[in-house]
Amino acid sequence: MDYTTILIYGTALIALSLPVLYQWSSQGHWWHDQLGVHLMAFMSVQAVVFTAWALARFLGNALGRVPEWFSDWVILGTFTAMPIVLAWRAAELVRAGRDVRRYSFDQEA
């Protein structure tokens, strides 16, 4: 097994563990907050994407090639889900910036 395969599998394993750890460490209270929901969604999308890449690597090694339908689904899933959560992240950052500016103006008054 080459080092890139080990890195891909390790990344997928870590990515899969993060939503589980977040659920455990927050005792399930992450869904009470908009940012908590976003964080769980972001970590879950990353887990799905990295696991799909690891599975593609595994299939490529086991079968000699990755089935074309699987590659299509990985690409479709990656470039559909990831932009959605990234746009959500951008919206959260803009909202947080607005809240900080509003708070600082309120303090001056």
Image (cartoon, grey):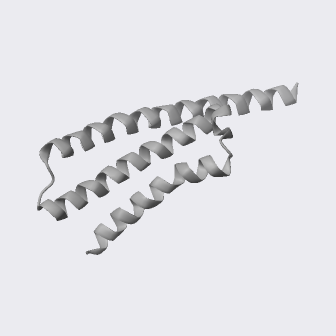
Residue 103 is left or right of residue 54, and the answer is: right
Q: Which residue is at a point 33% across and 34% down the rendered structure image?
A: 80
Using the image, determine if residue 20 lies above or below residue 84. below
Q: Position of residue 5 (x, y in %)?
A: 29, 67
Q: Quadrant of the N terminus?
A: bottom left
- Image coords of residue 15 (percent x, y): 46, 55
Q: Residue at x 36, y 67 (%)?
A: 7
Q: Position of residue 2 (x, y in %)?
A: 26, 74
The C terminus lies in which quarter of the figure? top right
Q: Position of residue 90 (x, y in %)?
A: 52, 34
Question: As displayed, is residue 56 above or below residue 79?
Answer: below
Number of numbered discs visible in the structure rendering? 0
| Pick the front one: 102 or 89 | 89
Q: Residue at x 58, y 53 (%)?
A: 21
Q: Residue at x 55, y 36 (%)?
A: 38
**Does residue 52 appear left or right of residue 14 in this picture?**
left
